[in-house]
């Protein structure tokens, strides 16, 4: 199952979480996780965006197993895992409400995850409301695993 969404993100982030998540989104970001552009906890994934606010392209793909992607096609790649006990994932933003929350039914279990970031350099002005950056979240049945940055975004000659 693969679904594409356009969300109006805010505060440089959006979330994919179990419907019954308990992670406190007010306290999850630290210096390293901001640099990594992601927080992956047991029941929530927070994806950092290059844009502060605006229409952002997001794809959520649920597969039977890991999918091979061309790493060169993506600017930044983060892997980890999330567990859903409710059987419903929520895709939402920091200041979103029930009307803008997307509901994605899944089997209750642990999913390994890969977050693929594309066209990050297209965001010249982080306060511009539109752009070509996109975020692809892939989930497949798996085990709990540590969060790892597989490819780090570089802008110019310095690390972001």
Image: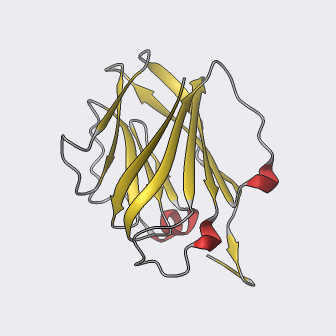
Most extreme residue toward the top is 107
Q: Residue at x 79, y 50 (%)?
A: 71
Q: Residue at x 44, y 28 (%)?
A: 83
- Quarter containing the N terminus: top right
Q: Is residue 157 visible?
A: yes
Most extreme residue toward the bottom is 157
**In x, y percent, where is residue 140?**
59, 25
Quick check: 111 left or right of 56? Answer: right
- Quarter containing the C terminus: bottom right
Above or below, 99 relative to 118 = above
Count of numbered circles on the image:
0
**In x, y percent, where is residue 9?**
36, 59
Above or below, 36 relative to 40 = below
Above or below, 124 relative to 10 = below
Residue placed most toward the observer, 141 or 58: 58
Quick check: 157 left or right of 146? Answer: right
Quick check: 103 left or right of 113? Answer: left
Above or below, 59 relative to 64 = below
Residue 66 placement: quadrant: top right
Q: Residue at x 69, y 61 (%)?
A: 75
């Amino acid at each position: 199952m693969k679904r594409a969404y356009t969300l109006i993100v805010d505060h440089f982030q959006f979330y994919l979480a179990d419907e019954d998540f308990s992670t406190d989104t007010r306290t999850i970001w630290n210096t390293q996780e901001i640099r990594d552009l992601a927080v992956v906890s047991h029941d929530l994934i927070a994806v950092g965006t290059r844009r502060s606010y605006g229409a952002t392209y997001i794809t959520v793909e649920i597969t039977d197993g890991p999918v091979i992607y061309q790493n060169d096609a993506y600017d930044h790649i983060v892997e980890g895992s999330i567990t859903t006990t409710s059987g419903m994932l929520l895709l939402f933003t920091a200041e979103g409400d029930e009307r803008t929350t997307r509901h994605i039914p899944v089997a209750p279990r642990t999913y390994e995850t890969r977050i693929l970031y594309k066209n990050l350099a297209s965001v010249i002005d982080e306060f511009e409301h539109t752009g070509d950056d996109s975020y692809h979240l892939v989930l497949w049945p798996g085990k709990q695993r540590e969060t790892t940055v597989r490819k780090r975004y570089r802008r110019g000659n310095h690390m972001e």
